[in-house]
Amino acid sequence: MRRSGLLLKDLHSSCVPKPAVPECSNGGSISSFVVGEQEAGRRLDVCLVDRFVGMSRSGLSKLIRSGLVTVKGQTVKTGYVLRMDDLVEVITKADKSFPKLSPQQVDFSIIYEDESLLVISKPSGLVVHPGAGNEQVTLAHGLLYHCGGLPSNDEMRPGIVHRLDKDTSGVMLVAKTESALRKLTKDFHDRKVGKQYTALLLRCPKREIGRLVAPIGRHLVNRKKMAIREVGGRYAATSWRIIEKFSMGICLAQVTIETGRTHQIRVHMSSIGSPVLGDNLYGGRVLKEMTTMVSRQMLHASTISFTHPKSLEQMTFTVPLCPDMQAVMDYLRR
């Protein structure tokens, strides 16, 4: 099935009641994951730094030493070397800085909805879920408002199986049932979900078609950034194809990611001298004549392809560019 740019009215189908998040004596909750191929052989504390973006390595190490992190049900040391299929459980302490997530009306478009899942178009500027430094109203609040309850292993991320950066617009999947959450999460982990982006790049790559494989990890100095890290980074692969070139050296590219690392496209394209236009964090400065038009990175999640978790039907959804990005394209063409 292929759905291209189809916007449906807000549907009022019922959603399953949200299950209780496991609570602990410290008032926190339990998060768990199974170690995959790319994490096997890495230190536990280093792996947790990449998975728990809002927490410091020292804070996570303290959780491990306090016995709040277990591997296969056993407490371990911070330097424990993870093995394939290890079950890691992390008891996070209650964060008093965040009020309990409550339903609030949020502006986003519903592309498709059934009893198992939602396909939405996220506008730029909308944070997906609360986190360190992000206490405003998020997509997660809006999802609860629309559905009333959603499954999750983390009460701050109801139904969310993948993320987009705050200033990246485009298509997202949301799970509405426990079985859909498990299946979609596994498919993302196993790289069975196709993700295609549209990007305006400040400079054209030397090759019009290319593929970059380079591991990505947290920047050693600036914790807000990611970086290519040969040691300690996680496998990441990005492919691109130039669609259109403009007179100022800017180009339009179709970018496909085989993995889903934080800031992956932004880091990879910047590393080859072609940062995303408007991405100040990774060198995508805005030209003077465009400062009033470009207020965020010009990156849009355009297409997603996946297997429906219940019907097993192959589905593809494409959403058009946001008005601000389309306006920049129109200006460049003129």
Image: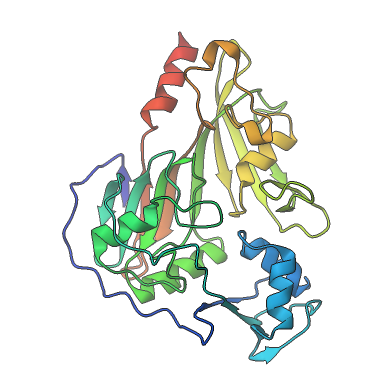
Q: Position of residue 41 (x, y in %)?
A: 78, 73
User: Residue 91: percent from the left, percent from the top?
Assistant: 58, 80
Q: In this orientation, which residue lies closer to the viewer: 134 or 231?
A: 134
**Among all residues in the image, which is located at the extreme bottom?**
74
Name above or below for residue 186 compared with residue 199.
below
Q: 321 above or below 135?
A: above
Left or right of 9 in this view: 286: right
Where's the C terminus, which quadrant? top left
Q: Residue furthest front?
A: 96
Residue 239 percent location from the top left of the image: 63, 42
Residue 133 shows in this picture: yes
Residue 266 appears left or right of 197: right
Compared with 213, 113 (above or below) is below
| Residue ranking furthest to the top | 334
Q: Number of callouts in the render?
A: 0
Q: Is residue 91 above or below residue 264?
A: below
Give coordinates of residue 36: x percent, y percent. 65, 72
Residue pictured at 34% horizontal, 79% vertical: 19
Q: Which residue is located at x 33 percent, y 69 percent?
A: 150
Q: Is residue 101 left or right of residue 185?
A: left
* Residue 118 visible from this viewpoint: no
At a point 51% along the width and 70% down the height, the residue shown is: 186
Q: Residue at x 66, y 50 (%)?
A: 237
Q: Nearer the viewer, residue 325 or 100?
A: 100
